[in-house]
């Protein structure tokens, strides 16, 4: 059975309103430890269909075309709530070919050495998993769309443990590399994450400047993404309250794929510029309901679930070029946040945020000692305009979509 047969099955049920999605993915995963080297191959194949029948939407998925045909028959027996179909995109593109799947790099020994050096022997790398994957996705619909995209990724996670006397701290860090592996930067983040909490020193100030490592800035931006999909339930208006003029926010996945998970062409979308909210991300359903054009942000977290509006590659864009060292020199009395120790909390309805982190106290641009545990909290509407500067050291993190962030300087924050 082929995709052509499935198109015929869907066209017979919904001549003008159907969509067929297919996915093929492979990955090679290298798990390493002090006495471990194990490589695992993984493969995934999936098919999914959406169509409108008797005035209501339907969705089903399966691992094979034959399984999907059976699921379509079963799904058609279930009643659904009435809803209008979207305006389907059209067009064709040259079929995409996935690149050859190479083995992931073996980095454990180098990373273990760097983690030990960065922590002066207090931290040890216990496991490293590096995964290299390739993926091909294809989408066809009743409007004549027939496109495909291929992508590749290099990501994974590292676990480590820190020891100082009788005190112990362990942690797991996720990473993603778009180019060559940044082993040195990963080693520094690992060392900080498992050794800074060992100092048992609380925040020395109750307020001051707040300097955020790119990993912390990315976690903050990831928590703010509901603002840009219209799902935050915000009672205060970011555009009216004002945002920082020192940094913009953009979503641009054009380098990753030509289309989103619904076949809408990828494009660069400016979300924040000149201190104001410029627009929202939309998928086909959100575009139909809002009357705005789709921005190409229908994302499939799995072939087993329908696409939903979501960022695809969101990142901060500095308005000025400053290094992280220059931002550090501007801190008169504050804290450098090296790593978050709990998920960032953002309550949009009540206009509140909370970030738990470890870091380093800073006075007159110089480090004064580690801070084992600190918390910054306050109003989101006051935090966002206080971004005073962003550096040029932007990095991307899988949270779970790629989130890019540089070192950020917040001019005022309250600490606990």
Image (cartoon, grey):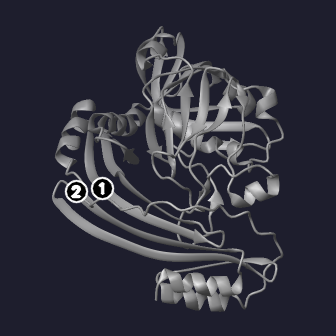
Residue 157 located left or right of residue 414: left
Residues at badges 2 and 1 in contact (C-beta under 8 Å)?
yes
Q: Note whether residue 8 is visible.
A: yes
The answer to whether residue 386 is above or below residue 377 is: above
Q: Nearer the viewer, residue 298 or 7?
A: 7
Q: Note whether residue 416 is visible.
A: no
Instruction: Give the secondary structure at mark 1.
Output: strand
Residue 71 located left or right of residue 336: right
Q: Residue 349: image x %, image y %? A: 79, 44
Instruction: Give the secondary structure at mark 2.
Output: strand
Q: Residue 308: image x %, image y %? A: 65, 60
Q: Which residue is mark 2?
A: 32
| Image quarter of the C terminus | top right
N-term mark: 2 or 1: 2
Q: Nearer the viewer, residue 196 or 164?
A: 196
Q: Which residue is mark 1?
A: 129
Q: Residue 93: image x %, image y %? A: 49, 60
The answer to whether residue 384 is above or below residue 104 is: above
Q: Residues within 10 Å of mark 1 (few under 14, many from 20)?
A: many
Instruction: Report the disc number at residue 404.
Output: none
Residue 20 located left or right of residue 98: right
Q: Nearer the viewer, residue 32 or 254?
A: 254
Q: Residues within 10 Å of mark 2 (few under 14, many from 20)?
A: many
Q: Residue 48: image x %, image y %? A: 56, 76
The answer to whether residue 347 is above or below residue 416 is: below
């Amino acid at each position: 059975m082929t995709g052509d047969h499935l198109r015929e099955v869907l066209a017979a049920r919904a001549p003008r309103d159907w969509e067929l999605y297919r996915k093929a993915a492979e990955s090679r995963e290298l798990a390493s430890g002090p006495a471990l080297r194990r490589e695992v191959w993984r493969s995934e194949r999936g098919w999914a269909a959406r169509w409108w029948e008797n005035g209501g939407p339907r969705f089903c998925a399966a691992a094979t075309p034959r399984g999907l045909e059976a699921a379509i028959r079963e799904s058609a027996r279930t009643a659904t709530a009435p809803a209008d179909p979207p305006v389907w995109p059209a067009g064709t593109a040259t079929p995409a070919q996935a690149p050859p799947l190479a083995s992931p790099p073996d980095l454990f020994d180098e990373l273990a050495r760097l983690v030990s050096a960065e922590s002066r022997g207090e931290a040890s790398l216990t496991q490293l998993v590096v995964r290299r994957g390739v993926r091909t996705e294809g989408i066809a619909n009743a409007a004549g769309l027939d496109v495909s995209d291929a992508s590749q990724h290099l990501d994974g996670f590292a676990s480590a443990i820190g020891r100082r006397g009788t005190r112990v701290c362990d942690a797991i860090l996720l990473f993603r590399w778009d180019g060559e592996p940044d082993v040195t930067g990963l080693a520094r983040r690992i060392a900080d994450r498992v050794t800074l909490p060992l100092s048992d020193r609380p925040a020395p100030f109750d307020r001051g400047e707040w300097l955020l490592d790119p990993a912390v800035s990315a976690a903050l931006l990831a928590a703010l993404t509901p603002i840009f999909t219209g799902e935050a339930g915000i009672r205060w208006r970011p555009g009216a309250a004002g945002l920082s003029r020192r940094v913009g926010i953009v979503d641009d996945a054009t380098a990753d794929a030509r289309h989103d998970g619904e076949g809408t062409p990828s494009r660069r979308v400016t979300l924040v510029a000149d201190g104001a909210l410029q627009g929202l991300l939309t998928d086909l359903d959100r575009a139909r309901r809002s009357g705005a054009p789709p921005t190409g942000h229908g994302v499939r977290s799995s072939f087993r679930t329908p696409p939903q509006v979501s960022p695809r590659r969101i990142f901060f864009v500095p308005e000025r070029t400053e290094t992280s060292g220059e931002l550090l020199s501007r801190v008169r009395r504050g804290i450098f946040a090296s790593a978050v120790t709990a998920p960032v909390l953002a309550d949009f309805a009540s206009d509140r945020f909370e970030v738990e982190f470890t870091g380093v106290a800073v006075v007159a641009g110089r480090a004064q000692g580690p801070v084992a545990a600190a918390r910054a909290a306050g109003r989101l509407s006051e935090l966002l305009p206080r971004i005073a500067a962003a550096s040029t050291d932007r990095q991307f993190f899988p949270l779970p979509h790629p989130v890019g962030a540089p070192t950020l300087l917040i001019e005022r924050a309250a600490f606990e």
